[in-house]
Image (cartoon, rainbow, N blue to C red):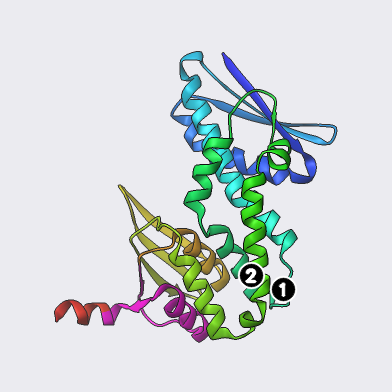
């Protein structure tokens, strides 16, 4: 039996919960298991597998750590260093978009930095090994802050989000959004699987779209929220299903 344990200060327990959630599905392929426990002010996560599955388990853990630092860690860092007088809705949407921005290049850098080993500490890695990424994130914060005045104009705000999303490699080629009883559904395909996502609010829908960054977004039917329609068109160049059908006929 091969086993390793990683830990984090309890103030950042969500980082370790994120790692555990991200890699649970991946652990199934190498018949590995994980368990969480607390001791004092630290949260520990132990991973175990048979010796022959060691490399697969380490790859799964590393993948989870890369995503944790690249999403959760980056989100916390930018949020603590970027104060703007925007509405909560616009600020949160901007924050999620900044986290997605340049995601692939940051993941490549994290892949070089992170070396999975027993007794590693997530807060230690974040505090002492991610200085290059933190410099990039500070630049993002400073650039956004210096252009903050433009963000209070909705047209300019949408243009900025459109630019940031254009720099995100899409996870899916095409998505269709529908409004159903005040909620929203997203459907599409990813490799050999089907995507079906339910979003209860327009904000939740936008977060999913930012993460997936589809090349093509189709609106099936009308949307009761005109502001949402404007943003889907302005940021993702969304088209109505009728427009797409008419274009296909031509």
- Image position of 144 (left or right of 215): right
- Residue 144 tag number: 2
Q: Residue farthest to the left?
A: 250
**Secondary structure type for disc 1:** loop
Residue 231 belongs to the span the image colors magenta: yes
Neighbours of disc 2 within 10 Å: few (<14), some (14-19), many (20+)? some
Q: Is residue 89 visible?
A: no
Residue 29, relative to residue 165: is it above or below?
Answer: above
The answer to whether marks 1 and 2 mark residues whose Cβ atoms lie closer than 8 Å is: yes
**Secondary structure type for disc 2:** helix
Residue 207: percent from left, percent from top: 54, 64
Q: Which residue is mark 1?
A: 84
Q: Who is closer to the viewer here, 202 or 238?
A: 238
Q: Start and end of the magenta stretch?
A: 216-243
Q: Earlier in the sequence, mark 1 or mark 2?
A: 1
Residue in view at x 74 percent, y 69 percent:
83
Residue 70: percent from left, percent from top: 58, 48
Q: Is residue 90 visible?
A: yes
Residue in view at x 39 percent, y 76 percent:
237
Residue 215, relative to residue 48: is it above or below?
Answer: below
Residue 166: percent from left, percent from top: 43, 66
Select label 1 or label 2 by which is in front.
2
Neighbours of disc 1 within 10 Å: few (<14), some (14-19), many (20+)? some
Q: Quadrant of the C terminus?
A: bottom left
Residue 42, relative to residue 160: is it above or below?
Answer: above
Spatial distance from mark 1 to mark 2, Cα to Cα?
A: 9 Å
Residue in view at x 53 percent, y 74 percent:
160
- Image position of 153 (left or right of 81): left
Residue 74: percent from left, percent from top: 64, 53
Q: Quadrant of the N terminus?
A: top right
Residue 233 belongs to the span the image colors magenta: yes
Residue 17, relative to residue 6: is it above or below?
Answer: below
């Amino acid at each position: 039996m091969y086993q390793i344990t990683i830990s984090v200060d309890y103030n950042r327990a969500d980082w370790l919960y994120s790692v555990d959630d991200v890699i649970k599905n991946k652990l199934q392929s190498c018949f590995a298991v994980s368990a969480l426990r607390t001791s004092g002010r630290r949260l520990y996560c132990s991973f175990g597998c048979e010796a022959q599955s060691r490399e697969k388990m380490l790859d799964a853990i590393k993948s989870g750590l890369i995503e944790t630092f690249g999403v959760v860690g980056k989100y916390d860092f930018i949020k603590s260093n970027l104060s703007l007088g925007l509405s909560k809705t616009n600020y949160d949407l901007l924050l999620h978009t900044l986290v997605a921005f340049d995601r692939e290049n940051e993941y490549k850098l994290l892949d070089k930095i992170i070396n999975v080993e027993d007794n590693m500490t997530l807060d230690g890695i974040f505090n002492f090994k991610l200085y290059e990424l933190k410099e990039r994130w500070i630049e993002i914060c400073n650039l956004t802050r210096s252009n903050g005045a433009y963000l209070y104009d909705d047209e300019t705000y949408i243009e900025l989000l459109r630019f940031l999303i254009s720099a995100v490699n899409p996870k899916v080629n095409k998505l269709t959004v529908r409004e159903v009883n005040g909620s929203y559904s997203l459907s599409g395909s990813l490799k050999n699987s089907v995507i079906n996502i339910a979003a209860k609010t327009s904000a939740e829908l936008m977060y999913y779209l930012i993460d997936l960054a589809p090349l093509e977004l189709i609106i099936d039917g009308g949307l009761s929220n005109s502001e949402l329609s404007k943003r889907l068109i302005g940021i993702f160049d969304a088209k109505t299903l009728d427009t797409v059908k008419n274009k296909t006929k031509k």
